[in-house]
Structure formats: structure tokens, C-alpha cells
Image (cartoon, rainbow, N blue to C red):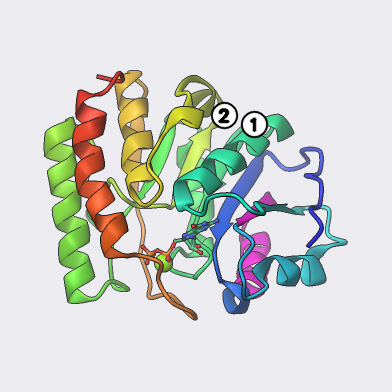
Amino acid sequence: VNEKKISQSRADTLVVIPTYCEAANIAPFITEVLGAINCDILVVDDDSPDGTGRVVLDHFENDPRVSLLSRRGKQRGLGPAYVDGFTRALEAGHPYVAQMDADFSHRPAELPRLREAASRADLVVGSRYVEDGRAAGLGKFRRLVSQGGSLYARAILGLPIRDVTGGFKCWRRETLEVIEFASVASTGFAFQIEMNYRVHKKGLSMVEVPITFDERRSGASKMSTGIFLEGLAAVWRVRLGRWR
Ligand SMILES: Nc1nc2c(ncn2[C@@H]2O[C@H](COP(=O)(O)OP(=O)(O)O)[C@@H](O)[C@H]2O)c(=O)[nH]1
Ligand SMILES: [Mg+2]
């Protein structure tokens, strides 16, 4: 898979979409995002064996709004993928950088609301656990883990938000510029917790916007026991670390 160079910033918003084995979701998902908001898109793929990167090129190679960052031969993981994606996002110059999952759990139709809120907050967090937010796509167990995890991390880290692990967000570029995200070490969903903590510690403002989290449309979750345990441990590592 050839890497397509990121286009010079056209829209004011770049949507970063991490993918690992999302071949069946990614093309319709990108189409839906492009239809929902005026934006550019950066897919950050970890050389998915199911050919996700190939699908992106096949469908969007000639669309200047869509770029692919193919992380070949690098250590897999959501965190490192985001670090590379956000680095590229800042280089591309967009004033707003959104992030969302490729599996249709996050609704493209809700993106404009997040982007809108980013004009009055340093970070906008799409939230399942505020009034009008929904976690319909989480099974009973996943919901317990997710909601319990949010309470746990919120209590230990003093975060002012209720959904600390979600991956549907909109950043102001200035926020990404000051939190030194390249040193964020978590590889799984703990990456989201760690990013939120840094924003909070910098004294920057975070607002939660209610979202509905749907079931993934196709393929399988990459959530694992290892990623879950990393999340539990990361909360303490972050709490006791340099970013106190
Ligand atoms: N680049 C990259 N993306 C990943 C990795 N793990 C998960 N993702 C993507 O991150 C998003 C959320 O992952 P998912 O497996 O749906 O987690 P869940 O929603 O918590 O079950 C999806 O778009 C995945 O394809 C990874 O190691 N590398
Ligand atoms: Mg998912």
C-alpha cells in the first residue's frame, strides 16, 4: 500500500480515523463523514491484514480530502496510531482536529455538533454518560466496565468529565500543541484518559457533548483483557507521573 501524502489543508476540520481491520466499514464510513461535514480526513491504519488501507486507496485515491497514513511495521496500538495521526494533523495546519472510530459506533451526523462546541472549548468530548448521551451499542458487561472505568479514572485523576474513555472528540489545534502528546504512553483506550488528563492539568477547558454510541456495524472489537488491565494501571501511572 502506497502512502498518500496528506493534502494541504482545505477545510478547517481534519477528522482522524484510526483503523485496524475495518475493511468492511471504512469506505461507507468515510463517505458518510464527508457528507455530514465539510472536512478533510486522515485514516491512520496499522497495516491491517484485511486490506483496510487498500480499500481507502481504491475508493478515495483521487479525492483530495482523504489521506491515508499507513503505519507499516510499527508496533500496533490505538495510542501510537493517534500520536502519528495527530502529528500529521498539526503539520497539515487545520485549526480543528476531530477523532472518531471507523466502525460506525460514532455517528457522523453528530460531528457538526462537536465541531461547533469546539469554538467555545479547548477540547470537546463526545459523551455517553451525560444527559441525553447513550451507550446503546455497549453490551451489559462492556457498559459496566466502561462506566465503572470512567468513575474510577474520574475519581483518581479529578477529571471534570463523565466519559473519560470515549474516542469521539474535537480538538482545537492549540490544545494539541501544548499537551506534548508524543510522550503519551498508553496504547489502548487508556490513551484517551491520558490525553484528557493532560488537557485538564494544563488548565484548559473541556466540554462534554452528548452522543449516542452505537454497536459496531461490521468486524470485531480489538478490546482485550490486556488493554483493560493497561487502563487500570495507566490511571495510577498517570496520577503519579510527571503531569501531576
Ligand atoms: N491504527 C489502529 N487502529 C486501531 C487499533 N486498535 C483499534 N483501532 C481502531 O480504533 C477504533 C476503536 O477500536 P474498537 O476495536 O472498535 O474498540 P471498541 O469500540 O472499544 O470495541 C476502531 O476504528 C479500530 O479500528 C490499532 O492498534 N491501530
Ligand atoms: Mg468500536
Q: Please determine whether, in this image, residue 227 is positioned above or below residue 183.
A: below
Work out how far the residue at label 2 is from the one at label 1, CA to CA, in angstroms: 7 Å
| Residue at 26% in and 40% down | 234
Instruction: Name which quarter of the figure residue 117 lies in.
Output: top left
Point out the stretch of residues depicted in magenta.
26-45
Q: Would residue 62 be seen by someone viewing this image from the given angle?
A: yes
| Residue 170 on image: x %, y % | 49, 42
Q: Residues within 10 Å of mark 2 (few under 14, many from 20)?
A: many
Q: Rate crowding at label 1 as few (under 14), some (14 to 19) or many (20 or more) other CA atoms within 10 Å.
A: some
Q: How many marks?
A: 2
Relative side of 182 to 93, left or right? left
Residue position marked by numbered label 2 in the rendering = 173
User: Closer to us: mark 2 or mark 1?
Assistant: 1
Name the quadrant containing residue 192: top left
Determine the residue positioned at 13% across, 55% down. 148
- Asked if the stretch drawn in magenta spans residue 44, the answer is yes
Is 167 placed left or right of 96 in the picture?
Answer: left
Q: Quadrant of the N terminus?
A: bottom right
Amino acid of disc 2: Arg
Examine the rendered structure and indicate whether residue 161 appears above or below residue 138. Answer: above
